[in-house]
Image (cartoon, rainbow, N blue to C red):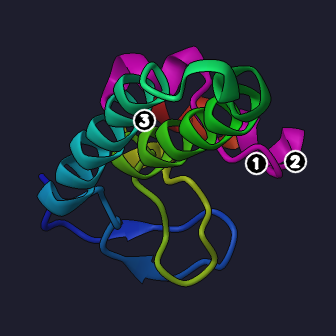
Amino acid sequence: MSHDLVDCPRCRAAVRPVRPSVTDRLLLAGCWLVAMSMVAIGGLLGPFLFVLSPFLIAFGASLVRTGHERAFREPHCGRCETILPDALPRHRAMMGARDPHASSQEVSLARKAHA
């Protein structure tokens, strides 16, 4: 359950997992809307499109990427930002969704907890 406390493997605190909210999903929809409107407006630029298109593409891609990272991030500790494997669904935890900075010992402990 999302209201249960989970022990963080890094800071050893009992915390509630921080999960993406509905506003994060709405933000992602807004990012896609802005990126698609930039494509539509970019078609009206005519010959200036060749000069401005690299900037429009880079800005649109970074905007959508940031929106996806916010909307689909894993449950994490509110104190140290560590991904909490105990708060993940079992199949995601076994696939190795974890903190990229976690040591191999922390990862093996998390996998043993789910075994």
Disc 3: which residue: 38
Sort mark 3 into few (<14), some (14-19) or many (20+) by Cα contacts within 10 Å. some
Residue under the point 69% across and 68% down: 10
- Please rate how many residues cluster around mark 2, counting C-alpha atoms within 10 Å: few if below 14, some from 14 to 19, many from 20: few
Q: Is residue 51 placed above or below 13 in the rendered structure?
A: above
Relative to the observer, which residue lies in front, 13 or 2? 2
Q: Quadrant of residue 59?
A: top right
Work out whether residue 92 or residue 33 is closer to the camera in this orientation and state it: 33
CA–CA distance in space, label 2 to label 1: 5 Å
Q: Secondary structure at mark 3?
A: helix
> Is residue 90 one of those drawn in magenta?
yes
For the record, the magenta segment spans 89-108
Question: Taking the image as drawn, is residue 115 in sight?
Answer: no
Q: Position of residue 71 (x, y in %)?
A: 34, 46
Mark 1 to mark 3: distance in Å?
44 Å
Q: Quadrant of residue 8?
A: bottom right
Give the residue pinned by disc 2: 103
Q: Residue drawn 68% across and 29% down?
A: 48
Q: Are marks 2 and 3 in contact (CB under 8 Å)?
A: no
The disc at residue 106 is 1
In this rendering, position of residue 109 left or right of residue 20:
right
Amino acid type at mark 2: Ser
Q: Is residue 31 left or right of residue 100?
A: left
Answer with the quarter of the image where residue 44 lies: top left
**Dot 2: element:** loop
User: Mark 1, mark 3: which one is toward the viewer?
Assistant: 3
In front: label 2 or label 3: 3
Q: 80 or 62, which lies in front?
A: 62
Where residue 106 appears, as percent x and y from the top left, is 76, 48
Query: Left or right of 30: which side holds 1?
Result: left
